[in-house]
Image: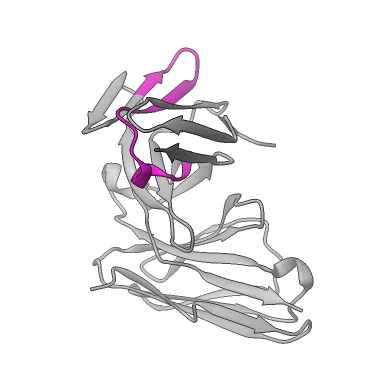
Amino acid sequence: DTAVSQTPKYLVTQMGNDKSIKCEQNLGHDTMYWYKQDSKKFLKIMFSYNNKELIINETVPNRFSPKSPDKAHLNLHINSLELGDSAVYFCASSQDRGWGAGELFFGEGSRLTVL
Amino acid sequence: QQQVKQSPQSLIVQKGGISIINCAYENTAFDYFPWYQQFPGKGPALLIAIRPDVSEKKEGRFTISFNKSAKQFSLHIMDSQPGDSATYFCAASKTISGTASKLTFGTGTRLQVTL
């Protein structure tokens, strides 16, 4: 049983296209995240939602739009893709109280390649 | 600005040896310090974590040492095994709005354990 699942695992697309990545968690967590890992493996937070409400919104181009239809799902839509968007995008979830809030469970990642 | 500095960038240790990875942070608002282990093609997985009111935490072969006054913490892997070969990330967490945690990651250490 996969705790945090992302689809698709790989995306290859042309510059200027729009793409979406979907994420679902079955851990019963209230908080979900999107992280970006660049080619140097550096991990940086992009967004966080708690029970469908946006909590963290880092300095991310507004071509990136997260959507949380319910607390178990957090999707990421990217418009007008650019070469620099190529990266691995990780979805994660955590509890929203106490020390558990700092313990994130990550999905396996979605590798986006923009040509 | 890199708020969590991690060293070394890469580490080669013989089987049975001790692997040591060091991290330093700047922001005293961080309230939780997890370590993540990442295998190629997988998402980061929580390995061990420590709160700032504790100086050491041990789980099996993995130990975190934490020095609050120096704003430093380290991961020790005792009796290192080839299966430990992975990239290790330290992180520092700050609770946001009481419902989400913003993890700031170190730059990662690629550990290779040789036979």
Q: Is residue A43 magenta?
A: no
* Residue closer to the observer: B111 or A86: B111
User: What residue is shown at x 70% (from left), y 37% (from top)?
Assistant: B1
User: What residue is shown at x 42% (from left), y 17% (from top)?
Assistant: B68
Left/right placement of residue B29 relative to residue A72 reads right
Q: Where in the figure is residue A5, as x and y percent of width and height?
A: 37, 74
Can you say whether B113 is above or below A84 in the image? above
Left/right placement of residue A97 relative to residue B2 reads left
Write the start and end of the magenta stretch as one range. B65-92
Q: Where in the figure is residue B96, as x and y percent of width and height?
A: 45, 47
Q: Quadrant of the C terminus of chain B?
A: top left
Q: Where in the figure is residue B43, as x and y percent of width and height?
A: 44, 60
Can you say whether A44 is above or below A8 in the image? above
Q: Where in the figure is residue B41, as x and y percent of width and height?
A: 48, 63
Quadrant of the rendered structure where residue A86 is?
Answer: bottom right
* Residue closer to the observer: B91 or A108: A108
Q: How many marks?
A: 0
